Image: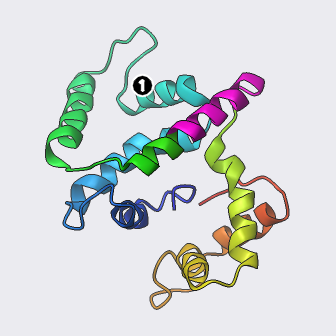
Amino acid sequence: HLANKDYASLVNDFIDLQILPKDCDRAKVVPLMDKALSPYIKGGGAKTYERELRKTYKFDDDGVGAVGGFQAMTQDALTVLNDIPFSIPAYFAILGRAIVTLEGVALTGNPEYGIIMESYPFIARKLLKEDTPLLQQSLQELLYNGDNASGGVKFSRLIALVNSAGGNSADSQE
């Protein structure tokens, strides 16, 4: 869901992982996830993430923002801290530390490395090869944007999935 920027489904994932409560305010969470996670998907580590956040909040290279930029950033941070009850389970924190360490090692060799898109071929192969109900449901959500009743297959996602499973680049995501 993260690679495809499907933040509504990512909220469900965070609920299943017990990071967010079942009754969280999705109208607040989804746009904040978009702002916080979209720059990370592009790869390039903390420097690229910071550059993308500066663009989002309209800060220039000197740290000077457009009128309201700092206020908007502060408001988003306060919303996350005060209005969205979340917790990080111990197992998730440990996995997160391991992934951040691996990403750091990769970034020393390639400053533009993006762990989300680099892991997509593995995930694509797993979705296409495994026949477990959970993975089949995930594949269906990916290809039909979570709802196969209201439309057809998202062909751009299907093409990206097949290309990624074959070892090609995954950066042509929808």
For residue 171, say whether it is visible: no
Looking at the rendered structure, the kind of residue marked 1 is Arg
Question: 138 above or below 114?
Answer: below
Of the pair 140 and 97, the residue shown nearer to us: 97
Image quarter where the C terminus lies is: bottom right
Which residue has dot 1 on it? 54
Residue drawn at (69%, 52%), measured in percent from left and top?
A: 119
For residue 121, say whether it is visible: yes
What colouring does the structure picture have? rainbow
The x and y percentages for residue 157 are: 65, 69
Write the start and end of the magenta stretch as one range.
97-112
Magenta stretch secondary structure, dominant: helix
Of the pair 7 and 152, the residue shown nearer to us: 7
Q: Residue furthest bottom?
A: 149
The x and y percentages for residue 122 are: 73, 60
- Circle 1: element type: helix
Q: In which image quadrant can residue 53 be found?
A: top left
The x and y percentages for residue 115 are: 64, 43
Q: In which image quadrant can residue 172 be found?
A: bottom right
Residue drawn at (19%, 60%), measured in percent from left and top?
A: 25
